[in-house]
Image (spheres, rainbow, N blue to C red):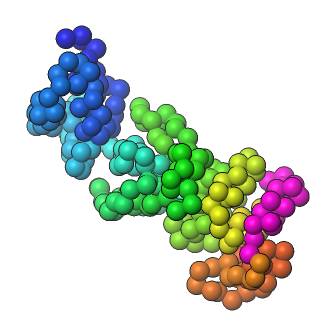
Amino acid sequence: MDKSMKPVNFFATHPMFRHEEFVAFHAASGRRSVQTSASILKQHVAAGNLLHVRRGLYAVVPRGVAAEKAPVDPYLLVSKSAGDAAVAYHAALQFHGRAYSVWHRFHYLTRQRLRSFSFRGQEFVPVQAPAAVRSLQDLGGGIQEKPHAGGRVRVTTLERTLVDVLDAPHRAGGWEEVWRSLGMVEFFDLDAVNDYATKLRSALTAARVGFFLEQHREQLMVEDRHLDVLRALAPSQPRYLDAKRESGKLVAAWNLVVPERVLSRAWAEVS
């Protein structure tokens, strides 16, 4: 067998991997038995070379480190939690270094219906991609693959993340956390923002995005043409910014009833 096809060489380039990835590698080496692949993985777990994180998911243990103390990168774990998994919402902001608060909960997008799980005090929460983009290629786009911790992480771009956290603010800590986190971003490709917001086909989300961009018009160099696209998608009747129907002031341009604390960004006064 070609020495490059040895399991240890696979482990050297895959700090975290799914069972089927190793099976495919092993089949390419000329050993086609799934049972043989499973046996090899079991041997390496027993030897302390691999950590069995959860069913079908393994992390490589660095040499000289006990398996129970081996570091496991949460973003690599997310990316391997499903074949199409992508780090999203607050976890994406955190990955990009633009989260106001540090969380130990990591949301990820997938087409599949999966259950949340915990590992070493961290929670991993699958979210079925919005119905409007679930069947589209790459879940509607705005997902990039980046090198990280010796592996590759699939994560939503800052542009898609902006739209996603305004579409589902409860997955990013609520309005203050969303506003503070997005306010840390110096630049967005606003055409990409509008492209994804249009794909979501949500009038409320389009209005939320438009309102946010209008509030940050100078900072983000927002042009009328960017806002015009979103205004055309906004609700025809007034809607509450918040799902809890929190009272506030009607912003007629977006047909949004916006709480005073968001309008005035009151939290900035006590920073």
- What secondary structure prevails in the magenta region? helix
Q: Residue furthest top?
A: 2
The residue most toward the bottom is: 247
Mark yes or no: residue 59 visible.
Answer: no
Measured as percent of width and height from the top left, residue 77 is found at: 36, 46
Q: Quadrant of the C terminus?
A: bottom right
Q: Position of residue 123 (x, y in %)?
A: 36, 61
Residue 219 on the magenta segment: yes
- In the image, the segment drawn in magenta is 214-235
The answer, for residue 103, to whether it is visible in the render is: yes
Q: Nearer the viewer, residue 36 or 185?
A: 36
Kindly identify the residue that appears in the image at 80 percent across and 59 percent down.
229
Q: Is residue 112 left or right of residue 138?
A: left
Q: Is residue 265 magenta?
A: no
Q: Is residue 32 shown left or right of residue 136? A: left
Q: Position of residue 239 (x, y in %)?
A: 70, 81
Give the image quarter of residue 111. Answer: bottom left
